[in-house]
Amino acid sequence: MKIIAIESHVCHARMRNWIFIKVVTDQDGLFGWGEATLEWHTRSIVGAIDDLAELLIGQDPTRIEYLWQMMYRQHFWHGNGIVRSTAIAGIDIALWDILGKSLGVPCSKLWGGPVRDHIRTYCHLGGGKMEDFYETASEDANRFADLALQAVEDGFTAFKSMAVPPTLPLEGRKPIRTAELCVGAMRNAVGDSIDIMVDCHARPSPAMGMQFAKALEPYGLYFLEEPCWPESVEGLAAINSSVATPIATGERVTNLAAFRDLFAARACEICQLDITHCGGLSEARRIAALAEAYRISLAPHNPQGPVSTAASLEFGFSQPSYIICETVHNDVPWRQDIVEEGFITERKGRIVRPNTRPGLGIKINEAELKKHPFQQELPQRVFYTDGSIGDW
Ligand SMILES: [Mg+2]
């Protein structure tokens, strides 16, 4: 079997362009799908895919580790910058899809699964609708409570919110109190049986992240995500050791060595590796093995498109420490027109039963996808009160 083409299919989904990678073989009708979505860097990824394709055309697609090493180590520069690690991921995921299809088994079976009967999922407030999730002001606590109730009515037992306002490296009591009121309103609305997550989006400084973490500790968050920059491993570790709330991070970490440093410092309890950014399922499995040694949970980052979700679920059915799958369902109204999924989501509890189809179990509707060609992603910008640049 040989690889004869590697194609990037770009689908504009408002805030992101989904980048689906199709690896085509010389076997009749056998191809695999991957995803390499990287918001605001779509053209860079498409170019990187073309560069990597030069290494892979004519190669056997079932030699996945060999090809991964080729993509990562050849071309002189290691493939751990965000553009290359994402492009490698897109191709790697498609190679696993091909292997599963060629053997007639779901990907999770290739890795010894399934290890569980179902996977729990969580949603973003508003189901991932950009205005609800990213643009609801944390001062509007009632709106957060309404959106939280909506998530529960939609069947979810867990949801994520962005209830922490952007702050300068140091601010006083007001933003802390704002976050407290916001999380308190959500907790009052949904009670103690629903799990609430708060994503700080790595905006706070370690000093502000520590204050947010301590202020929100009484509300029993399921996890507090990225309370400071991922580069501040010591800051994350200090926060993680200072509160009972489990700290989650890892969505911007792109290689095994960086995860080693994160885990060795005990900078998190939940590893949010992004399968589409960390080098794909091959590297994700190495990261998971490392996390297992530290008894750190896995909850992969997944706000992207439907191939990313299928990859996360196949991975989850093979990983004992996988705790929950991030999902969005309301980012664009035509999401389900693009994909036919092999797994079943039960509305009550929003749990997912295993895919029984080969590979990732998905079919992408290329005609539907073409209805949404590339457009520049909508900007999301943060400026502080004094006009200085903030982190989105
Ligand atoms: Mg996040």
Image (cartoon, rainbow, N blue to C red):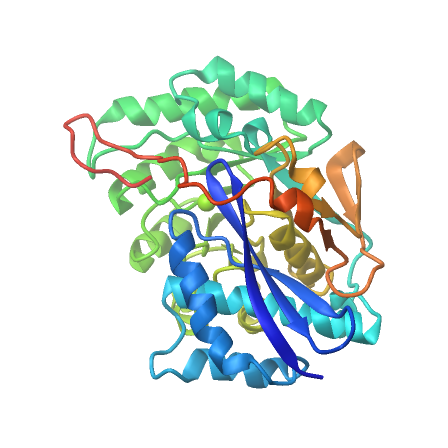
Residue plotted at (46% across, 74% down): 52
Is 384 placed left or right of 336 in the picture? left
Residue 259 appears anywhere in the view = no
Name the residue nearer the viewer: 329 or 229: 329
**Above or below, comparing residue 270 to residue 391 in the picture:** below
Is 269 placed left or right of 341 in the picture? left
Dividing the picture into quadrants, the one containing residue 209 is top left
Q: Position of residue 322 (x, y in %)?
A: 65, 57
Residue 364 appears anywhere in the view = yes
Is 230 placed left or right of 191 in the picture? left
Dividing the picture into quadrants, the one containing residue 141 is top left
**Above or below, comparing residue 101 to residue 189 in the picture:** below
Q: How many marks?
A: 0
Image quarter where the N terminus lies is bottom right
Residue plotted at (71% across, 60% down): 314
For the view shown, which residue lies furthest in the top direction?
A: 142
Residue plotted at (77% across, 46% down): 352
**Above or below, comparing residue 135 to residue 35 in the picture:** above
Image quarter where the C terminus lies is top left
**Above or below, comparing residue 15 to residue 184 in the picture:** below
Q: Position of residue 40 (x, y in %)?
A: 38, 47
Residue plotted at (51% across, 20% down): 144
Dividing the picture into quadrants, the one containing residue 152 is top right
